[in-house]
Image: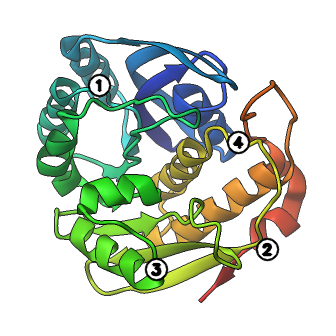
Amino acid sequence: MTNVAMTIAGSDSGGGAGIQADLKTFQELGVFGTSALTAVTAQNTLGVHGVYPIDADGVTAQMRAVLDDFNVGAVKTGMLFSAEIIRAVAETLRAYASPTLIIDPVMIAKGGASLLLDEAVEALKTDLIPLATVITPNIPEAEVLAGMPIETDADVVKAAERILQLGAKAVVMKGGHRQQTAFAEDLFLAANGERYTIRSEWIDTKDTHGTGCTFSAALTARIAQGMPIADAVIDAKRFIQAAIADGLDLGAGHGPTNHWAYKRGGEVAQKEGVVID
């Protein structure tokens, strides 16, 4: 059986993030990728130079075309841009026997450009997050969703609990912005109480464009293949760790990660690289 995953996100003309990163990741992990485009961006490693959203009806039509024809095992969302698009996505997913939903709450690009309108945050919290099986915020995104600053380990846990109260079944608090810690640490916390921390070595590189997209896409691919969620999170972490470690050195700014590093790295990349506590 061929496993199918779907990404609902924006296009990155530079190829490092968004729809492009998601489809590359699906392919590398042996999953057939489908998509619904929410916006086109003029983007490269130096930043976002323009955002051109798709009409919400167009997003809905793309989703229905895929969901009517394919047995989609898992869906992920990335850049959704507006409250109108968020509500359209949520309404469409509710109309189907929805597959597992992974939300990457994309808000700000690496260069600082806003990728989610301010008024869309409330729609994300009230309309889409209650449908989520897993949500994967970085620290700045988690601060917005939880409505609190995050500085300490205790803050990370408290914010995760607040996000779970919005209705998600599990949250992965990505720790890449907390560079004062000895290791890069991600917290997995589920509504059923399951909890662990994933630790990995810091990697000195500027090539981190699209890391959130790639991580959540790897998570989506593994869930589409039937892997238990807690195990899929760990495997996705190994995928992105390999992608960051084996950089491509492209562009003059924040370069893309290496989407084929995990497969090329073989058993070492696929079984090592992170510590679970």
Residue annotated with mark 1: 63
For image coordinates 69% across by 76% down, the residue present is 183
Q: Amino acid at mark 1?
A: Met
39 vs 151, nearest the viewer: 151
Q: Which mark is residue 28?
A: 4
Q: Amino acid at mark 2?
A: Glu
The answer to whether the residues at label 4 and label 3 have Cβ atoms under 8 Å apart is: no
Q: Earlier in the sequence, mark 4 or mark 2?
A: 4
Give percent across and percent down for residue 123.
15, 40
Give percent across and percent down for residue 166.
17, 62
Relative horizontal placement of residue 239, taking residue 175 as reference (left or right) = right
Front tag of 1 and 2: 2
Q: Quadrant of residue 190?
A: bottom left
Residue annotated with mark 2: 272
Q: Quadrant of residue 116?
A: top left
Q: Which mark is residue 152?
A: 3
Q: Is residue 97 visible?
A: no
